[in-house]
Amino acid sequence: AAPSGEPRMDSQRDASLNRRTAAMSGAMGAVIASNGQPALAENADLKTPSATARLQRVLVSIGDDESMDKELKFWKEAVGMKVLNENKNSDGNRVALVGFGPEFALEFRVDPKVLKRARPKLLNYDAMQPTVDALSYLQMGTAGKVMEVFARVQNSGGAALLGDAAYLDAESPRGVPLRMICKTEVPTVELISFNVEVPAFEPTFKFYKRAVGLKELKYPDDGPPVVRLSKLLASDVGGPNLLLTPVPDGRLKDRKLDEFEGAVMVSPAATSFSTAAAAAIALAAKEEAQKVEELKQAQGADSESQGLQRYMTGTRAIPSMTSEDGFIRINDGVGNIIFVQDQADYRPMSV
């Protein structure tokens, strides 16, 4: 996405459309090239725990106040959300909470450092394919017909990308991707989708099941199109679902340069969450070591084998956990940051 405050030109919107289309068409070839569907069997050493957290917020950085005004206009007029709260942080920069209600919200923070960031590469020159964001999209139900939604998006500074009679894919002025499903009179955020590199897809999928306790759901047959082999996950304690989408390695933008800063999850028992996450991280490290050893042995038996080199130079899922300002800070293994807070300490309307 373009840095905050920089006008979005028609060519940039075309590039966004190309990236969305390429992500849906290109991932399948990468999965086939990596020997087909990921094996998703759980390791007998660690059972999937009971759900311990739900998705509560998505965090987005914005470069300046003018860009904040444009972003808020879009989410209010195009999507129908409300500004739940707006304040200034200790640095004097604006922070706004936007949502249909306090059950889930987007948190926008003005951060002047955004304006000094390098632009992420928009093209993988090795494959000559557009790059995609780590945050694939937020999906929400909305009232009205697609053409009405299209007009709202265009008139409020967003970019309409693609869709059909039932849904529309779009981007906000900041570049936040969203999918609006025209099917309900009561708007709600239904799911959040992350793009995950194919070599790291299976370990990342396992991590969300093991550490967070999410359960796999069957993607609805009548739902909008998603990349084949995507995995839909849900929490027993509510909140939007999580959709993990496989994309070819090397096709994601640098996560440090895009608009997505992370997500907040709320746990009924943060201590139990921390225990489950620590066990999941330890098991992931054990499985990673086993994988490397297997590839070393295969290379020893066949001097021409390139499996180890390809694996070590590709994206590998290495999850981690630390504490930060009263939150449990989780790296899901591929660089998506999840901040987890105990339900007793969480204030839905605070910024």
Image (spheres, rainbow, N blue to C red):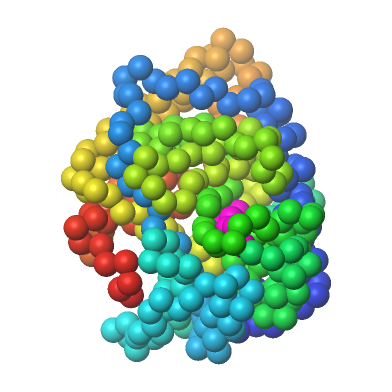
Q: Residue at x 63, y 20 (%)?
A: 305
Give how far across and how far down residue 93 sits, in percent.
Answer: 39, 86
Residue 29 vs residue 162, the one in the foreground: 162
Give how far across and how far down residue 296 sits, in percent.
Answer: 50, 20
Does residue 101 lie above or below 165 as drawn? below
Whether residue 305 is in magenta: the answer is no
Q: Quadrant of residue 14?
A: bottom right
Q: Quarter holding the N terminus? A: bottom right
Q: Quadrant of residue 150?
A: bottom right
Q: Residue at x 35, y 54 (%)?
A: 265
Q: Main secondary structure of the magenta part?
A: strand
Q: Residue at x 24, y 55 (%)?
A: 343
Q: How many marks?
A: 0
User: What's drawn in magenta, residue-wise?
Assistant: 135-142
Does residue 309 lie above or below 86 as drawn? above
Residue 275 vs residue 118, the one in the foreground: 275
